[in-house]
Structures are given as C-alpha cells and as structure tokens.
Image: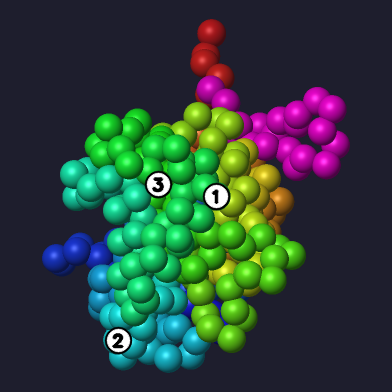
C-alpha cells in the first residue's frame, strides 16, 4: 500500500513546476526529497496531500485515486508537517497537538492522552500549556512533529512496540523541512523519531537540505532538478555522489568522512569553486 505519484505535471497558474515526476512513498521507509530552491519539492508534497491537483498524471493512495477519498479518511491516513505554523500561534501547545486528532471520533480524554504522549515523545511536554507563539521556531517544529504523531496515532510507536500503527491501514507522514530551525541535537533527535516511525510501517517522506541528515537517516532519495524533473531516485549512496549533485546544484562537492565513525556514510559538502590566479 503506497502513496504514489505517477508522471505528475503540476504548478501554479500557467507555470509548470513539476514535469513528469513519478515518486512513491513506501510503507516502512524514509524517503528524502532534495533539490535546488524552486525545484518543486513543496509542490510535490502538496500534490501528494491532495491540496494541489495535478494537470497531468495521477496520485493514488493504496491503489485508490487520492481525489476520490473523503477528506476525513485521508486525514487519518496522511499527516503533514508544514514549514510554518503561524495560523496556530494563538493556541497552546497542547491544543495544537490535539488538533491532529480532529478527524478521529473519540472522547476528549483519549484525545488529550494522545496529545500528551506525542509531546512526551518529542520532549515538549513541559511546555504543553504555553502559547505556541511563545516558543522558538525550532521548538514550534517539534510541536508540529508531535501533532503529526498524534494524528497518526503513533506517539509511542517504536520499531518493537506492540502499540505500533496497524499495518492493515495505510499511514504516511509528509514533512516539509521539519528540522530546518532546530539546533543539531534536536534535529538529530527529531529525525530519529521519524526513522523510528518508518520502522513501524509508516511511509515517511521528508524535504531536507541537510545532506548529512539525508545520508544518516534516509532509505531512499529523490533528487529534483531546477526544472522540476527527476534527476535521480535511488539509495543515498548513489544520489549523494559529487558528480550527481554537481550536475543539479551547479557547484562543486566533495565527500567528507567523520573521524572515528566507520559506520557513518561519507557526507557530501559543497566546496568553493577554485578561483583563477
């Protein structure tokens, strides 16, 4: 049961952003979506969510046309972490996370417990009663991650948990730069939460710009070029190769290794172009 986009053409007004893009979010795997600014990474997430209709191609959820699935059912299957959280700034942290449960008909006590578990999972339970707008951007991103966990009923889910999401129902999490404002410790911890979530059977797709995180956490990588086309779709080691990245980003890359961590793959780092003497 996948969340799939086939030969997608999509954009805004008369301008195409995505051109013939095919991509599938696979249960149990974490896919990273990378590419230059304006390549269509966010647009692809919007198409997969069903909030932007493609002008060509098709999107399916578990082999059903996404547009034919009622919004409440869709909300129980697909959670989304946006880049910004400004519409919810007036709500408390606890209220924001509880919003993730609105598509589920359940007693308030159950909803509150789900929110509590999700906040505990991301280390934000002690800020539950504070306004979301009082938090830093990175803390707000952790709250949005908690909301997505609550929405998927997966706050306590770890790879070996009996409480992991049921494999009989499709579950997907789409995240648009979910750790961009976090410090390194919380970014790694949050990516670990997403990786654990994927290990329980949830399909996870994450837009990232940090290639170190892509190398460490992704199972699959989709690289879009500046024209909104698929430049590469493969495991991280194949996509995060300097020749592949240089062709798309138009800047030199070099592979760097972390001393003392033989099990960590090399990380591609952008390097300055040599200057003429």
Residue 259 seen from this side: yes
In the image, is 35 to the left or to the right of 105? right
Residue 139 location, quadrant: top left
Element type where label 1 sits in the image: helix
Residue 177 seen from this side: no
The colour scheme used to paint the residues is rainbow
Question: Horizontal and vertical percent for residue 191?
Answer: 57, 47
Question: Horizontal and vertical percent for residue 140?
Answer: 36, 41
Dominant secondary structure of the residues highlighted in magenta in the image: loop
Residue at horizontal 14 percent and vertical 65 percent from the top: 13
Task: Assess whether residue 269 is covered by the magenta stretch.
Answer: yes
The residue singled out by tag 3 in the image is 143
Residue at horizontal 25 percent and vertical 65 percent from the top: 11
Q: Tell me if residue 210 comes above or below residue 150 in the rendering.
A: above
The boundaries of the magenta stretch are 253-272
Q: Are marks 2 and 1 in contact (CB under 8 Å)?
A: no
Q: Of circles 2 and 3, which is in front?
A: 3
Marks 2 and 3, the one that precedes in the sequence: 2
């Amino acid at each position: 049961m996948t969340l799939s986009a086939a030969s997608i053409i999509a954009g805004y007004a008369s301008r195409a952003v995505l051109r013939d893009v095919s991509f599938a979010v696979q249960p149990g795997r974490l896919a990273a979506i990378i590419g230059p600014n304006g390549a269509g990474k966010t647009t692809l997430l919007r198409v997969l969510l069903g909030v932007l209709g493609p002008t060509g191609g098709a999107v399916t959820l578990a082999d059903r046309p996404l547009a034919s699935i009622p919004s409440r059912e869709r909300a129980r299957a697909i959670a989304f972490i946006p880049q910004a959280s400004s519409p919810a700034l007036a709500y408390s942290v606890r209220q924001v996370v509880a919003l993730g449960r609105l598509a589920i008909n359940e007693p308030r006590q159950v909803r509150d417990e789900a929110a509590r578990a999700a906040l505990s999972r991301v280390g934000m339970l002690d800020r539950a009663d504070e306004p979301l707008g009082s938090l830093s951007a990175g803390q707000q991103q952790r709250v949005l991650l908690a909301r997505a966990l609550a929405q998927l009923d997966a706050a306590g889910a770890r790879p070996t948990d009996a409480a992991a999401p049921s494999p009989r129902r499709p579950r997907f999490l789409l995240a648009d730069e979910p750790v961009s404002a976090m410090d390194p410790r919380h970014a790694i911890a949050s990516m670990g939460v997403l990786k654990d979530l994927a290990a329980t059977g949830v399909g996870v797709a994450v837009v990232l710009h940090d290639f170190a995180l892509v190398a460490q956490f992704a199972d699959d990588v989709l690289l879009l070029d500046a024209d909104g086309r698929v430049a590469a779709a493969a495991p991280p080691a194949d996509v995060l190769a300097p020749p592949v990245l240089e062709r798309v980003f138009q800047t030199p890359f070099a592979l760097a290794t972390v001393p003392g961590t033989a099990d960590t793959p090399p990380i591609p780092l952008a390097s300055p172009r040599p200057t003429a003497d």
